[in-house]
Image: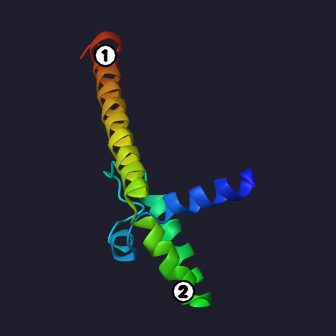
Amino acid sequence: MVQYRALVIALILLLSTTVPEVHSKSIFERDRRDWLVIPDAVAAYIYEVVNKVSPRAGQFLVDISQTTVVSGTRNFLIRETTRLTILAEQLMEKIKNLWYTKVLGY
């Protein structure tokens, strides 16, 4: 029962965007800060497969993915991963600057 709930929650989180929004993002874009692009693309493919098998189940997944709980969770994850990415980029800049000034003497 717990595994079933975990699977349902994972599918809900994966399917928390609309299909056109997912297809408009590039997975391999270099300057992309959004770490959720790959799960969104996977969710779009899962939706397409489920929708081909059963349009009612596909509509159910769309309805669930647009609830406020799922949207709020997804927005929180996007906000926090973006914040962590910016901090990691700043840390890399500081390390690179330190390397050039202290080690290489530029």
Q: Nearer the viewer, residue 2 or 10?
A: 2
Label ID, residue 42: none
- Which quarter of the figure is the C terminus placed in? top left
Against 2, is 64 above or below? below
Residue type (three-letter) at the residue carrying disc 2: Arg
Location of residue 36 by image quarter: bottom left
Residue type (three-letter) at the residue carrying disc 1: Leu
Which of discs 2 and 1 lies nearer the camera? The answer is 2
Looking at the image, which residue is at 42% across and 59% down?
37
**Residue that mark 2 sits on:** 56
- Which quarter of the figure is the N terminus placed in? bottom right
Q: Which x, y percent locates residue 54?
A: 59, 88
Q: Is residue 106 left or right of residue 78?
A: left
Q: Nearer the viewer, residue 4 or 77?
A: 4
**Residue that mark 1 sits on:** 98
Q: Which x, y percent locates residue 95?
A: 35, 21
Q: Which x, y percent locates residue 104?
A: 33, 16
Q: CA distance from mark 2 to mark 1?
A: 57 Å
Location of residue 83 by image quarter: top left
